[in-house]
Image (spheres, rainbow, N blue to C red):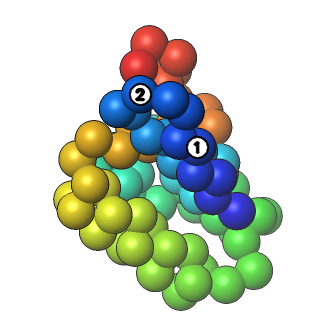
Amino acid sequence: MIVFVTPPGPKRYAFVGDLVWQLEGITEREERPWLQRTLGDDDEAQVRENITRMAALAARFPELVIVPAHAATSAAR
């Protein structure tokens, strides 16, 4: 599940949960580590497609702040 939040002002956020663990998962289209994928994903092809879709959204809307659940840098942004 991805939650999009648009508070007053120019910033928009996409909370992508565990789709990826770091922002590089979207910018570099990197999947989570093998063990986490094996234990948590039912459909690896669908996960890859969702990562590709989020990368396309990020490219189309550069003002969108993507917030993965486990990225240490997310709080700073």
Which residue occupies 46% across, 60% down? Answer: 31
Give x and y (percent) for residue 29: 33, 61
Q: Would residue 25 appear left or right of 44 to someone viewing this image? A: left
Q: Nearer the viewer, mark 2 or mark 1?
A: 2
Mark 2 = which residue? 9
Q: Amino acid at mark 1?
A: Val
Q: CA distance from mark 2 to mark 1?
A: 11 Å
Count of numbered circles in the view: 2
Residue in view at x 71 percent, y 71 percent: 41
Which residue is at the front of the view, 60 or 24? 60
The foreground one among 39 and 76 is: 76
- Between 61 and 54, the one lying in front of the other is 61
Q: Quadrant of residue 37?
A: bottom right
- Which residue shows up at 52% across the image and 47% down it? 14
Q: Position of residue 24 (x, y in %)?
A: 34, 44
The percent coordinates of residue 35 (x first, y second) are 67, 57
In terms of secondary structure, where does tag 2 sit? loop
Q: Residue at x 56, y 75 (%)?
A: 47
Residue 49 in picture, x, y percent from top left: 46, 81
Quadrant where the C terminus sits is top left
Query: Badge 1, how many Cα within 10 Å: few under 14, some, many 20+?
Result: few
- Tag of residue 63: none
Mark 2 packing: few (<14 Cα in 10 Å), some, or many (20+)? Answer: few
Where does label 1 land, which residue? Answer: 5
Figure check: 50 above or below 76: below
